[in-house]
Amino acid sequence: MAKDTSFTKMDLNSFFTRLQEQNDVVASWSDATIGKCKQVLKKTLVENGYLDNSRSEVLNPVLLDFRVKEAIEDSNNKEALIAFGCM
């Protein structure tokens, strides 16, 4: 099964919509606050190498340190390994 590595404006909008549905505090935030949070999240993804630039719509793979991978394997956490693309 291939992973969907796309990351579009619609993904950001969906994320914040779900967050607002789940949390009353977030639901009370203004449109300007939500917009700023989207900017900061995208900038953080770029600064940490998960996106090549602010216009990129493809997430880069997560590089997992081998010690972290071993610790996850030792804890038999298959869901975490799948999330990091190790299975």
Image (spheres, rainbow, N blue to C red):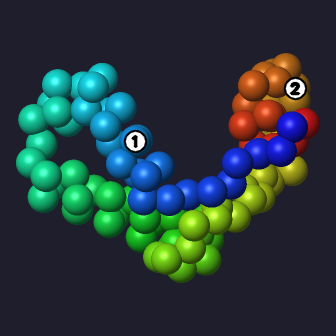
Any part of residue 48 in sight = no
Q: Position of residue 25 (x, y in %)?
A: 15, 31
Q: Quadrant of the N terminus?
A: top right
Q: Which residue is located at x 42 percent, y 70 percent?
A: 43
**Where 47 falls versus 75 (above or below)?**
below
Is 15 left or right of 22, judged from the image as shown? right
Residue 33 — which label?
A: none
Q: Which residue is located at x 51 percent, y 64 percent?
A: 45
Query: Disc 1 marks which residue?
Result: 14
Decide which of 41, 15 is in the foreground and name it.
15
Give the spatial CA distance, label 2 vs label 1: 34 Å
User: Counting other residues with Cα less than 10 Å from the Cα at mark 1, is it few (<14), some (14-19), or many (20 or more)?
Assistant: few
Is 31 left or right of 81, judged from the image as shown? left
Q: Position of residue 47 (x, y in %)?
A: 51, 74
Q: Quadrant of the C terminus?
A: top right
Query: Disc 2 marks which residue?
Result: 74
Disc tally is: 2
The kind of secondary structure element at disc 2 is: helix
